[in-house]
Amino acid sequence: MADSEIRYLTPPSIEVKKGKYCRFQRSKITHIDYKDPEFLLKFLNEQGKLLPRRLTGTSLKFQRKVSSSVKRARQLALLSYVADNLK
């Protein structure tokens, strides 16, 4: 028997990976408000660090806006710089 003669009862499942998308471009958000700390917490990990683009799927343009908004919120004490349990 050659490998080409192998037949399956059910076709082998091929996992389709969902593509990343920028949530700001999809929902057509143009302005990121630094006065909304609950929204900005979605882009921070447990220690208070910004999550990278490869994890959030945010485009470069909006990642820059998110980082500047988080920095502004930290300066106004709406977000903490470092936290043990931020979430």
Image: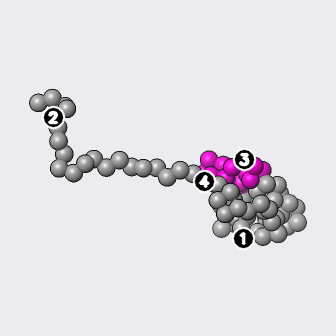
Residue underneath mark 1: 38
Labels 3 & 4 near each other (Cβ < 8 A): no
What residue do we see at 72% from left, 47% from top?
A: 60
What residue do we see at 80% from left, 62% from top?
A: 31
Instruction: State whether residue 65 appears in this view.
Output: yes
Q: Amino acid at mark 3?
A: Leu
The residue segment tinted magenta is: 49-64
In percent of width and height, residue 82 lies at 76, 59
Q: Secondary structure at mark 4?
A: loop
Can you say which quadrant of the picture contains the N terminus? top left
Labels 4 & 1 near each other (Cβ < 8 A): no
Query: What mark, if any, has residue 60 been given in the picture?
Result: 3
Whether the magenta-drawn stretch holds residue 51 is answered as: yes
| Count of labels in the image | 4
Whether the magenta-drawn stretch holds residue 26 is answered as: no
In percent of width and height, residue 67 lies at 78, 54
Residue underneath mark 4: 21
Labels 2 & 3 near each other (Cβ < 8 A): no
Instruction: State whether residue 67 appears in this view.
Output: no
In primary-sequence order, the first of circles 3 and 4 is 4
